[in-house]
Image (tube, helix red, strand yellow):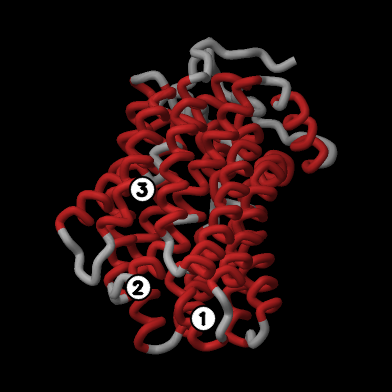
Amino acid sequence: MPGVLIEPLHEEFGWSHGLIGSAVSLNLMLVGVMLPCAAALMDRFGVRPVVTFALVMVAVGSGLTVFMTEPWQLILCWGLLVGLGTGSMSMAFVATITSRWFVARRGLVSGILTAGNATGLLIFLPVVAWLATEHGWRTAALLAAGAAVAVIPLVLLRNHPADIGLRAYGATEADPGPPPHQQAGSSAGRALAVLRDASRSRTFWLLSGGFAICGMTTNGLIATHFVPAAHDHGMPPTTAASLLAVVGIFDVVGTIASGWLTDEVDPRLLVGYYVLRGVGLMTLPALMSPHVAPTMWVFIIVYGLDWVATVPPTVALCRDRFGPGVGPIVFGWVFASHQIGAAVAATAAGVVRDVTGGYDPAFYSAAGLCAIAAAMSWAIRKTPQPVT
């Protein structure tokens, strides 16, 4: 949503792109910081209360934005409250459910769950853009708040298959899946202990570095700044938002396919994902125009297939290299780097726009970073490295 609302907020309040981007950066940063803690909280207190808290924070933060008149209020509502909410669920939920409920087809399942994010993009983004254009950005913010409240009664999740007398899907005597226990002690303390142990592994830093660049080139750059960048070239915001929604369509296909490939092929297929993304970003400035040319459709399709296709292999690598018991928490820390990268890009790209009058330097820089991410993914060893 912030990408669609940048221009309306800029026009109403006169806030710069960099200032609005800083609120998005705080949001993305909190998502990253909260993810490993959320995985530990789900382990200790259960999935249901953590997910319910997350939805309440999203509803409150989004709803309160309709009353804001100062930049600090945007940072408080959209940055802090919504950031806490989305960070308390998001990918920690995917990693936890996949690890607990499935032994077979974990990659495919993580792809399907991750595709839910793309489904939300597909459903809501064109509606949000239309509401912001026809009825004002406050109506769009209230839609987000209402949607979060509406799904709270649907949070009926069990914590573990054993709670209803089942075993994890595909469980065997050799691999029964994680035991049904709740970790005693501080959740934050456990998350930090896992970080301490995982940080001794070369694989952890390679995954974290690549995923930081993944965040820069998706949530931070394209999700936040594609709509205003297209608007700079004369494209209506509703059209640009609809293109992002189409990204969501192919995101569903790409993520589920990536989950299947993760099960069947080496998870280091991350290399190919980053190469494709870099090529797309390198060509994007030349594709911008008031109208949607066929070449822009090629970019949208390729970028959509690649958008969060990185998640299933990264979840698999965390689980395989660090074990199913702590794998979700390790992935939480790896995803924290994703959000840190996204936060940097959300502000930096806005500053680039304010200083240069365009986004081209940001797109070219991101393309170069994708090449680095591909190299880091290639350097991950095929065999697990024990964490000691």
151 lies above or below 296: below
Q: Could you say which is closer to the camera, residue 149 or residue 291?
A: 291
Q: Is mark 1 on a helix, strand or loop?
A: helix
Q: Is residue 24 left or right of residue 301?
A: right
Q: Which residue is drawn at 21% across and 49% down?
A: 298
| Residue bearing mark 2 | 231
Q: Is residue 29 left or right of residue 153?
A: right
Q: Which three-letter amino acid code belongs to the residue tagged 3?
A: Leu
Q: Residue 238 carries which label?
A: none
Q: Is mark 2 on a helix, strand or loop?
A: helix
Outermost residue on the front side: it is: 356
211 lies above or below 24: above
- Disc nearer the start of the sequence (2/1): 1
Count of marks overlaid on the render: 3
Percent position of residue 235, x then y: 28, 73
- Disc nearer the start of the sequence (2/3): 2
Q: Residue at x 64, y 87 (%)?
A: 69
Percent position of residue 286, x then y: 27, 56
Q: Which residue is drawn at 43% across and 23% down?
A: 268
| Residue bearing mark 1 | 10
Q: How far apart are marks 2 and 3 (CA)?
A: 17 Å
| Residue 152 appears in the picture as rendered | no
Using the rendered view, name the quadrant where residue 327 is placed: top right
- Disc nearer the start of the sequence (3/1): 1
Q: What element carries label 3?
A: helix
Q: Which three-letter amino acid code belongs to the residue tagged 2?
A: His
Percent position of residue 1, x then y: 46, 68
